[in-house]
Amino acid sequence: MKLINLIVKVWRQENETSSGSFQTLKSGPISTDMSFLEMLDVLNEKLAKVGKEPIAFDHDCREGICGMCGAVVNGHAHGPENETTLCQLHMRHFNDGDTLVIEPFRARAFKVVKDLVVDRSALDSIIAEGGYVSVNTGGAPDGNAVPIPQDTAEQALDASACIGCGACVAACPNASAMLFVGAKVSQYALLPQGQPESARRALDMVRKMDESGFGNCGNERECEAACPKGISIRNIARLNREFIKAAIISYEK
Amino acid sequence: MKLDAKIPEGPLTEKWDRHRFNSKLVNPANKRKYDIIVVGTGLAGASAAASLAELGYNVKSFCIQDSPRRAHSIAAQGGINAAKNYQNDGDSIFRLFYDTIKGGDFRAREANVYRLAQISNNIIDQCVAQGVPFAREYGGQLANRSFGGAQVSRTFYARGQTGQQLLLGAYGALMRQVKEGKVTLYPRREMMELVVIDGSAKGIVTRNLLNGQLETYAAHAVVLATGGYGNVYFLSTNAMASNVTATWRAHKQGACFANPCFVQIHPTCIPVHGDYQSKLTLMSESLRNDGRVWVPHNADDKRDPSQIPEAERDYYLEKKYPSFGNLVPRDVASRNAKEQCDAGKGVGETGLAVYLDFAEAIQRDGESVISQKYGNLFQMYEKITGQDPMHVPMKIYPAVHYTMGGLWVDYNLMTTVPGLFALGEANFSDHGANRLGASALMQGLADGYFVIPATIAGYLAETDMDRPDTDSPEFKEAEQKTEAKITRLLSINGKRTIDDFHRELGLLMWDSCGMARNEQGLQDALKKLPGIKEEFWNNVLVPGTGEQLNQSLERAGRVADFIEFSELMVLDALDRKESCGCHLREESQTEENEALRDDKNYSYVSVWDYGGENKKPTLHKENLVFENVQLSQRSYK
Amino acid sequence: MGWIKQIITTSIGKKSVMAVTGTGLIIFLFFHLVGNSMIFLGRDMFNAYAENLHRLDFAVKVFEIGLLILFLIHILFATLLFIENLGSRPQRYAVKKDTRRTWGSKTMPYTGATILVFLVVHLINFHFTDSNLTLSELVRSVLTQPYYAALYIICLLALALHISHGIWSLCQTLGINQPKYNKLLESGARSLSIAVGAVFILIPLLALFYSNFLL
Ligand SMILES: Cc1cc2nc3c(=O)[nH]c(=O)nc-3n(C[C@H](O)[C@H](O)[C@H](O)COP(=O)(O)OP(=O)(O)OC[C@H]3O[C@@H](n4cnc5c(N)ncnc54)[C@H](O)[C@@H]3O)c2cc1C
Ligand code: HEM
Ligand code: FES
């Protein structure tokens, strides 16, 4: 274990309507074994003790699976490490004297609520449009009734590994949500259970995505690089395919 | 008060069928006239809210996180059990039932557990139909793996992210009902108070975490699926927002709390490495299939593990339990690790860790085989610790993981407050004194998808259809009470931070009411707890205001409840003078230091009734009757 | 026909229009490239090619109108996308680092705009001209002027950059992405754009440095 000192430039914003600005803080000694969020905890304890308001940031599982945490650190969504959420980013990747610039995920579709906390409910509204198979509880056939090739199941899982953190949107130069939508549409496009609704799903989810204020995909691949679960833009291609199929071949409008 | 578990008559295998047949139903056209509040969107809450909405009820769904998909259930790794017997290895509903009862050390209700085993198969079918991508064999059939405490392969999984995939399935079903207009979502809301009118649960008070507004919601029934309270200990594998607040406040409104001292400690977690630590990370139990657990022979041996020769290593599990070796159940593995560390043989900077060494397996099978099996776990470990288990033995230590205790419920999952139901980890559960791996997901989904939709009808059918009114004095009173509490927290303006108190509480509970408990330690804790509470309410520092997003205030409220609740845990542990499952009373051990049950005196569920502020709670006992299994003492020698 | 409007106003719809028109433009580019390559075979071959081409007068007219429409649609949608994307992040980052975007992808709108300028100049030079020169004389007269040659070279570099992202991107947009042949696709797209750029650029280079160019 080592101790390092950092200069932290963090975005502070009172609420949704206020304008916000950067605040520069000295971290004090930080153990390199800490996670990034623990570093923020330490900073917050210090702020609280001198009667200042702690930095608000979202987090819950702190093990990289709930998708609640996230911020842009030195220009990278979830920080500079590959396939790592902010809560799993450890301070050993920084050096003594480094300056950290911490900003909230920014997009028209994600409003900043306070400091680093943003409103990502637009992602939920997209799921509501078809990110599921419409089966009621009860009456499902035996789990083995429809065989699913191993490889197909694995690919579906590659897609559904998405934790919905929104880093793809944050990293995209156009703040597009195509990787998020692509991952969900792909999961069901791959599995037999998803087939009956595939056309409707692609059309509805894409429309909702557009309505919510996300930008257009520019095939820039920044989303894939930022994704903590390593979800491939292949899923965007699959979404494009599903959408075009639905738009041109299916009866759905 | 008389506890009635409402266990249906008839043979074990027919109870659930008969019960469903005998229960009253709500006519389809009338369902839309009922409102149901579901607090929690984990596996239990999301599946319940979706299934109830599908039936036609109007559901209001609440959670703390910004999206229902982020509930703590998302973090479950290993898998979910079901008695499918796809492997043809002798599994059956009865065997799953038996394993669960036995794993729980005979402290669960037979009828409930049997129902759970029956429903387990429907869960898998349901999830597959939803498009949950379970692992498959080459031929396309569902794959299984085995888990601790069972001799059959019955665990269904999706890599190391089973909880995530199951929750996304349930969340999808929930969002479908949101789209249909049958569910209204209330994310970033914390339930602060249960509202009871004329003895029945009729609503809740919540705090909107975004703007601090207190809001009231009324319904014909309230379902709590708010998860476990492992965070009493400050450090646990639970998500940061996991809390006891919802169940504790319901308890104070009359819902009895059962077996609060039953807490499961998981043996393979990444050890604590500093005071700043906020959370412990679980490493899958499967690691113990190939890893060998050891400590240095001599206490205070600070040498690097590579410098410790074979002869000076103590493979204590293999030595002590020759037949199960490193694969003893969770509680046994955990206790032994603590024992070694208490004897000064712990390793690492803190001395609170033991080695889990893969060197032999790597030598035997080669790096590539081991990497294939555990690659992603090794990566996760390296991410956190900066060490590669391929070359340096892993360090592990037990951590609080799951709470078997919870609100007492009858066979219908109704608490002692009519109209208040508890599901998932929030109820006192079907796991008795110890939960088997991969059974929590099963129970949460059984409760939510299949049990509550059937049993809630029986209650609603006998309930007045008039919509309760949030203008009634009971709602106003509950709201004012909450407001007063918040105002008080904000006005203390003391010197110590919330985490500071939480850490102190956690440490005390870990030492006195953790892996091993004794009369002395528990009595001491009982004396110290009021002091912590007193100081908390006089010296805590909660920055910010109540009319904004204020994460400190949120934590303060939860810690305040943890402090109060801890007393109940300790009282419960004191009362249960036997050892059973995860509850080890040092006074009750066999000659070989194994847990010794006392079936004659303690074959009951401890059901605690809130006595009032600063009053002792009353203990009721639900006697457990075993008609279908033979009680036996566990042995893993 | 409401559904068509519904489709092409979605983000994927707009992107698909870009991809389809882009494909059309690239196909045209290849024909154009092959035609222009006649230059390397000498003045007579080149003039003969031009004459033969213009004998198909009607077909050429249809082709030109089609091409114009492709261009207009491509430009219209590019502008639309560009403007929409400008608004997608009202508050920019103070620090933002790129990881996987390429020079090509980053500069699409700007290389596109450069091509548009080029197009106008190019058409004025060779299409809307009433001179009586043969085609080879015309080309020579324009490209031997250093300013024109330089402009052509810069614009053709922009074109190469534009399609270096464009070819791969249109595949992705139309859903073609498979690990099995992704490597091939990417290197293919890169080599093609380099080849197209190189061959086109060779023409003004020759005009500048080879005094017998098209003589
Ligand atoms: C690391 C880890 C791995 C695990 N692995 C496995 C496994 O492999 N197999 C297995 O069977 N089990 C496993 N478990 C156990 C299992 O995950 C949990 O027991 C189970 O998911 C609990 O589900 P739940 O629905 O009851 O509650 P949770 O998922 O905890 O959900 C609680 C919900 O209630 C809400 N809530 C809580 N309090 C309030 C409040 N006051 N107001 C409003 N909303 C509130 C929360 O927002 C959340 O939505 C694991 C647990 C952990 C920690
Ligand atoms: C010979 C000329 C041209 C060719 C061959 C061409 C080709 C292409 C191709 C193949 C694409 C990729 C489509 C996709 O991503 O699916 C593309 C995109 C694009 N083109 Fe062109 N183009 C030409 C001219 C122009 C002009 C004149 C402009 C601008 C005024 C332009 C602007 C753009 C823009 C901005 C994009 C990116 C759109 C996005 O990614 O969102 N192009 N082009
Ligand atoms: S806190 Fe859950 S992913 Fe980071």
Image: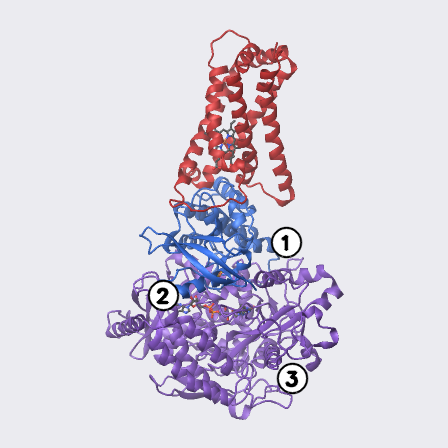
Chain colours: A blue, B purple, C red
Chain letter for mark 3: B
Q: Tell me which amino acid carries mark 1.
A: Asp
Residue wearing tag 3 = B635
Q: Nearer the viewer, residue B479 or C210?
A: C210
Residue wearing tag 2 = A50
**Picture quadrant of residue B329:** bottom right
* The C terminus of chain A lies in quadrant: top left
Q: Tell me which amino acid carries mark 2.
A: Val
Q: Tell me which amino acid carries mark 3.
A: Ser
Same-subunit check for callouts 2 and 1: yes
Could you tell me which residue is drawn at 56 percent across and 33 percent down?
A: C164
CA–CA distance between discs 2 and 1?
Answer: 56 Å
Q: Mark 1: which secondary structure?
A: helix
Check the image and name the residue furthest to the bottom: B600
Q: Nearer the viewer, residue A70 or C65?
A: A70
Q: Is residue C93 left or right of residue C47?
A: left
Q: Nearer the viewer, residue B351 or B203?
A: B351
Q: Mark 2: which secondary structure?
A: loop
Give x and y (percent) for residue B513. Answer: 50, 82
Give x and y (percent) for residue B280. Answer: 53, 69
Residue wearing tag 1 = A151
